[in-house]
Image (cartoon, grey):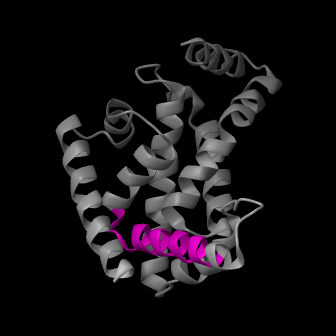
């Protein structure tokens, strides 16, 4: 893959003192990392903070990048760790903002121009139900769903990012999708 080799070249250039090289890595990956963080955390502000912390951590630890994994996998792993840390802190503080933020952002999903108001409301309600169901999953299941379904990573990429066996990724996704199916069936009733 051309991007992967370019990413590795950018890391080498950054380590050689090129001030623009790391900025290019950030430009290439910030949208995907933000999307991952938003999927895991559910709040735009938290996702922005986690994204920023991801790139700060990557920059601070650039010398530790050994090239054993792709830069994208390395960044995803840092982002997942940032999100897990934020979730733990939020749990300690007793915050449960995922649902309120999901409601606030329900209109983010694009609706067809010719959709009737009733259909538009139904689509927003369905999107909100899916978002609530995903955010209610345990963190280990939620992160796999977000990476597979929203980030469109392969099973192997997810295994590499989370540093878990491929079979674990598949079983977590299967379990998560079953739980989502049950939760969403309740919504439909």
Above or below residue 110? Residue 129 is below
Left of 88 or right of it: where is 57?
right
Q: Residue at x 62, y 73 (%)?
A: 119
Residue 160 falls within the magenta-colored stretch? no
81 to 70, vertically: above or below: below
Image quadrant where residue 143 sits: bottom left
Q: Give the x, y percent position of residue 57.
A: 59, 45
Image coordinates of residue 103 in percent, x first then y, are: 61, 80
Q: Residue furthest bottom?
A: 94
Percent from the top left, x then y, of residue 47?
62, 61
Callout count: 0
The residue located at (76%, 20%) in the rendering is 17
Q: Main secondary structure of the magenta part?
A: helix
Where residue 74 sits: x, y (%)?
Answer: 48, 34
Q: Residue drawn at (50%, 26%), measured in percent from left and top? A: 65
**Nearest the eye: 105 or 96:** 105
**7 or 59: nearer the viewer:** 7
Tell me the quadrant of the picture where the C terminus can be found: bottom left
Which range of residues does the magenta coloring cover? 121-139
- In this rendered view, identify the residue nearer to me: 153 or 80: 153
Q: Is residue 132 left or right of residue 35?
A: left
Q: Which residue appears at 44% of the width and 36% of the height?
A: 153
Is residue 21 left or right of 61 when viewed as pictured? right
Where is 145 relative to 84, above or below?
above
Residue at the far right in the pictured view = 20
Q: Is residue 82 above or below residue 188?
A: above
């Amino acid at each position: 893959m051309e991007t992967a080799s370019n990413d590795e070249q950018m890391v080498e250039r950054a380590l050689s003192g090129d001030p623009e090289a790391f900025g290019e890595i950030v430009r290439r990956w910030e949208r995907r990392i933000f999307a991952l963080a938003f999927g895991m955390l559910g709040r735009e502000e938290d996702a922005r903070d986690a994204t920023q912390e991801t790139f700060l951590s990557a920059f601070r630890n650039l010398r530790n990048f050994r090239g054993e994994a792709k830069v994208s996998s390395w960044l995803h792993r840092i982002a997942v760790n940032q999100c897990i840390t934020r979730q733990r802190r939020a749990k300690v503080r007793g915050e449960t903002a995922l649902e309120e933020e999901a409601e606030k952002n329900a209109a983010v999903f694009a609706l067809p121009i010719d959709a009737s108001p009733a259909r538009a409301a139904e689509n927003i309600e369905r999107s909100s139900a899916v978002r609530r169901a995903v955010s209610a999953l345990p963190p280990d299941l939620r992160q796999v769903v977000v990476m597979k379904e929203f980030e469109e990573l392969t099973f192997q990429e997810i295994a590499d990012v989370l540093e878990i066996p491929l079979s674990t990724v598949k079983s977590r996704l299967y379990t998560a999708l079953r739980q989502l199916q049950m939760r969403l069936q309740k919504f439909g009733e």
